[in-house]
Amino acid sequence: MIDDTHSLRRRSWVTSANGHADFPIQNLPLGVFAPPGGAARGGVAIGDEIFDLAAALELGLFDGPAAQAGQAASGATLNPLFALGREARQALRHRVSDLLDANGPERARIEDTRGRILHRAGDCRLELPAAIGDYTDFFAGINHATNAGTLFRPDNPLMPNYKYVPIGYHGRASSIVASGADVRRPNGQRKPASEAVPSLGPSRNLDYELELGVWIGPGNALGTPIDIAQAAHHVAGFCLLNDWSARDIQGWEYQPLGPFLAKSFATTISPWVVTMEALEPYRCPAFARPADDPQPLPYLLDEEDQREGGLAIELEMHLRTPKMKQPVRLSRGNFRDSYWTLAQIVAHQTSNGCNLQPGDLLGSGTISGADAGSLGSLMELTQAGKSPLALPGGESRSFLEDGDEAILRGRCARDGYATIGFGEARGIIRPAALSKNEQR
């Protein structure tokens, strides 16, 4: 529900928040940070600062449901807050918004505590926001699915089940890292068509994937599916997600069981959780299926979800090579091009009785648009390396090289509302670790 926390007129006494590209007072994303010399704790991004929830609690700035939510969000992970659900997040959002409001009745008292409750974000270390129990990566971007299928199966790009089933696979939670962590080029078996037998060595075709991450809030009991009409209530918020992919390793290993080592070496996410509540103004209709596409099966079909289950989130991928001073944008897509809504993804994940838990993470799958400027992977942009991408300064890329930095950014914009962002999910490719058994 859109309320006064979304008002474009609301401004903060934290002056860097006013007009901030990512974190104005209308956003208030949650995260976990460690200030200089301090332990990891929960906080809220506001402009170039971080609002310290533990310090605010110590100062008695919360009471009632907001105090319960603030306590749950003040520790080293946000899992306890995620478990409480929507009402707790709403109470926390409203109280923090009021505390930071430039026209709030308590401004003078609150601003006097600035030295205790605010930390400069650039001085702090950002952590993973939750202890991730499980991670599922989906394949919800139909343009990406079609493009990838066309490269390898030109006569049959989409498998017969694609328009009926939200396809996904169980990923590796242990290798999910926060933005800024280096990514080591993976080793694995590769067998291009030009080689008679496979060899073990560094991936030659390393790629990024432009995705949205979905944080699970309250879970469900084992054996109890989540109805699609209630699925959105089980989502706490969103982050940016880059599911790094070794295309050559994947091409050799993925049949018959799907991705394995080609994906499990690293997944980079942005550290801030943009809540469901912050995104209310940017909801939109679900993907408009062509008339000859099948309707979703009844367990995946809900009138309200079709009407406003989509999200208009603009996603951009930027690249900086070691020779570049500034990154260059490679693509700009939008999550509204996802064939499946987040509610459909959650409903399908649990339709067999699978139990989700607070802090589980779901990836949307690569989001690509219909035009060349909105493709969400190098595999698509370069036609699997056949058409290298020309870069400023005379460089080119077919796939990522050592020293390259991929930077994923996201934002939401709508007339009459503040533009809000997700921060960044960035990582630099480092050389593979080699042993005597590996080949270049």
Image (tube, helix red, strand yellow):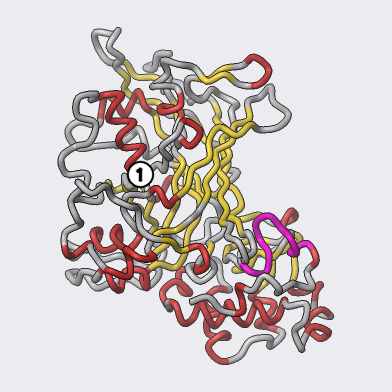
- Viewer-proximal residue, 34 or 346? 346
Residue that label 1 marks = 141
Magenta-highlighted residues: 16-26
Q: Which amino acid does label 1 sit on?
A: Gly
Residue 401 within the segment the image draws in magenta? no
Q: Is residue 310 left or right of residue 410?
A: left
Q: In this view, does 58 lie to the left or right of 137?
A: right
Q: In this view, does 110 lie to the left or right of 372?
A: right
The residue at the point 23 percent across, 49 percent down is 291
The residue at the point 41 percent across, 27 percent down is 379
- Viewer-proximal residue, 222 or 147? 147
Q: Is residue 351 left or right of residue 6?
A: left
Percent across and percent down for residue 268 are 50, 45
Image quadrant holding the C terminus, namely top left
Q: Which secondary structure dominates the residues rendered in magenta?
A: loop
Percent across and percent down for residue 286 are 35, 58
The residue at the point 75 percent across, 55 percent down is 123
Residue 114 sits above or below residue 120 on the image: below
Percent across and percent down for residue 381 are 45, 26
Classify 10 Å Cα crowding around label 1: few (below 14), some (14-19), many (20 and above): many
